[in-house]
Image (cartoon, rainbow, N blue to C red):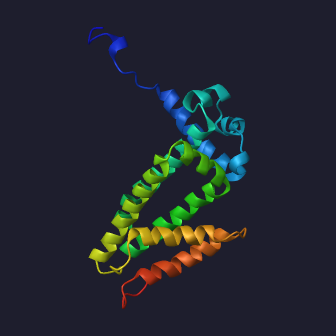
Amino acid sequence: MKLGDPAGRARRPRADAVRNRERVLEAAKVVFSQGGESASLEAVAREAGVGIGTLYRHFPTREALFEAVYRREVEQLVDLVQVLKAEASPAEALRLWLRANVAFVATKKGMLAALALATQKNPDLMAYSSDRLTRAVGELLARGVSTGEIRDDIGPEDVLRALIGMCYAQERPDWQASVLRLLDVFVDGLRKPGRPAA
């Protein structure tokens, strides 16, 4: 095969294929959050406005689709750190990032068995998300510590454990509103003594 040979070049996905993949991922997020583990792939395809064959071309299994949605949302949370650092004070950036995590948990709460299966098939998935999210919250904490706004005696793992505990300890229908109130109290508790809340 010659270097100039089109068959020798790596093929980039067509623009419509990339758009379809993104539509499927966005639709899956919506359908999974509403239907939980029982949500059908046909419902995802309908929500995305694509045929079931298109869905399967991109994601051959339910687990592959779930994992792609999960990874995409983790990366969105990681990317949000830079936006919040540019737009908000350290404590406010942390509070807003934790609130975004509550929305992330809300889409996963009904799919714990699916998440367990995905991590069983790919044990690196939980390590990947834990590492990415720990580093993200660590970056926000470090910024707050460096400005003197946030205490220096709590680590990113502690913050994530507290968040997970708040989210999963509540089984009431209004759990999100309750967690958001608790997050405000939690972030105020992270402030360095003598620093007023914003």
Residue 114 at x, y percent in the picture: 63, 48
Answer with left or right where residue 2 lies relative to residue 20: left
Answer with left or right where residue 12 lies relative to residue 168: left
Residue 119 at x, y percent in the picture: 54, 48
Answer with left or right where residue 103 lies relative to residue 72: right
Q: Quadrant of the N terminus?
A: top left
Residue 76 higher or lower than 93, as above or below = above
Which residue: 71% across, 35% down?
Answer: 42
Q: Quadrant of the C terminus?
A: bottom left
Which residue: 40% across, 75% down?
Answer: 91
Which residue: 40% across, 68% down?
Answer: 156
Answer with left or right where residue 90 lies relative to residue 185: left
Foreground of the two, 113 or 37: 113
Which of the 4 image quadrants contains residue 11? Answer: top left
Residue 136 at x, y percent in the picture: 38, 61
Foreground of the two, 69 or 46: 69
Q: How many marks?
A: 0
